[in-house]
Image: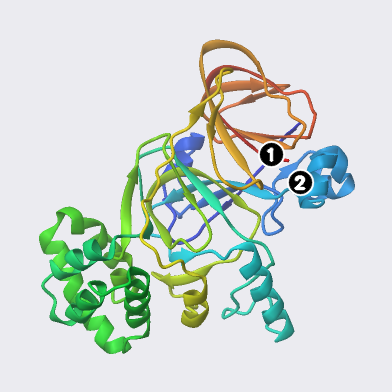
Amino acid sequence: MDRLDNTIRPYAWGSTTAIPQLLGIEPSGEPQAEMWMGAHPGAPSRTGRGTLVEVIEADPERELGRPAVARFGPRLPFLLKILAAGAPLSLQVHPDLEQAKEGYEDEEHRNIPIDAPYRNYKDANHKPELICALTEFDGLCGFRDPAEAADLLDGLGVDTLKPYVDLLHAHPEDAALREVLTAVLTADPDEMTRTVAAATAACTRLGGAYAPYADIAHHYPGDPGVIAAMLLNHVRLQPGEALFLGAGIPHAYLNGLGVEIMANSDNVLRCGLTPKHVDVPELLRIVRFEPSDPGVLRPEAAPDGEEVYETPIDEFRLSRYALPEAAGPHDLTRATPQILLCTAGSVRTGEYELTPGQSVFVPAGEKAEVSGAGTLFRATVIV
């Protein structure tokens, strides 16, 4: 078992206070957006034996277990994060596994540099993800019913939005959503800037259901993603609730602190709310144009006290333990690799006392008993 020393990523949208408050340290004044736990080559966790990448590469079967290596290869297939959004993230979507392989092979064939700002596919993997709220957490997830989106846009009273309203009343629904998103992202930039400014003023004036979009527009003035965001469901998670983001589902995190887990990939297609590259044709190939309920997840309780967030993929499995005062030892030993993360209280595992924000890597089959009073998240895989 190894205590992890983890990198904090200072992305501009990060909160300046949420992660320091969790860790019990003084804020630096700079954004602290994500703390990464895992073996992603961009910022692998460090251990007393080297980086987690080096530890796993030295003996994959010992660290990950033979079944996990056979199923996913000699690498940890997930990345665990603490995510602290102080401002909206980009509106985005992720490819499925087949789309990722096709896109990656195509860009490799065309010799597009891997670090080119206009490159879409950094690897050949998909990127399903799960976000579990530690505080109240706001996000956008999946398309609204087109009629509801039409009413929201119409309620702004902005003349230049009327064509989108009319399109959203057309049938079939998937074609209506596709046409509107395409029209928004390909509109004349100057005209769209004026439309977004008028919509922003209306959102600010009306408040209520429009308040989240006024805040988005404050951070991204003139961005067509402000209008695109109104096509999506707004969801507010309470602590302990979660969202699963599968392939093709447009989404954005807006504000709050959470534990995020994802397949180990960097493949993102952006729809707006970003200065980065937006590849509209490729985006339209990936997006699933169907209205959907956000599908808020609540954990399923097991007899031993483990609360599991069920998802339809195998690269990761996230659960938590809410340990009562002076809880006796819980045996968490598994035949798969694990990362254990404390988010509240104090939890002892092996030789380590974990306080909020601290984590350990547990190799496959390694004895793992936990005790104490606090909240512990467990990330592993399904084989």
> Camera-side residue: 143 or 197?
143
Q: Which residue type carries mark 1?
A: Leu
Name the residue located 43 percent from the left edge and 63 percent from the top edge: 250
> Camera-side residue: 360 or 151?
151
Name the residue located 47 percent from the left edge and 76 percent from the top edge: 284
Q: Is residue 347 above or below residue 328?
A: below
Name the residue located 82 percent from the left edge and 45 percent from the top edge: 55
Residue 174 drawn at (x, y percent): 37, 70
Residue 383's image quarter?
Answer: top right
Residue 326 drawn at (x, y percent): 54, 10
Which colour assignment does the render follow? Answer: rainbow
Is the residue under label 1 in contact with that under label 2 (CB below 8 Å)? Answer: yes
Graded by Cα atoms within 10 Å as few (under 14), some (14 to 19) or many (20 or more), the crowding at tag 1 reads: many
Q: Is residue 226 above or below residue 30?
A: below
- Alpha-carbon span between mark 2 and mark 1: 8 Å
Name the residue located 40 percent from the left edge and 46 percent from the top edge: 295
> Total number of numbered labels?
2
| Residue at the disc numbered 1 | 4
In the displayed orientation, state which residue is furthest to the right.
Answer: 59
> Camera-side residue: 337 or 11?
337
Residue 218 drawn at (x, y percent): 27, 65
Secondary structure beneath label 2: helix
User: Which quadrant is home to the N terminus?
Assistant: top right
Q: Earlier in the sequence, mark 2 or mark 1?
A: 1
Q: Is residue 35 above or below residue 318?
A: below
From where the camera sits, is residue 276 visible?
Answer: no
Lateral position of residue 156 relative to residue 279, left or right: left
| Residue at the disc numbered 2 | 52
Secondary structure beneath label 1: loop
Residue 213 drawn at (x, y percent): 25, 62
From where the camera sits, is residue 183 visible?
Answer: yes
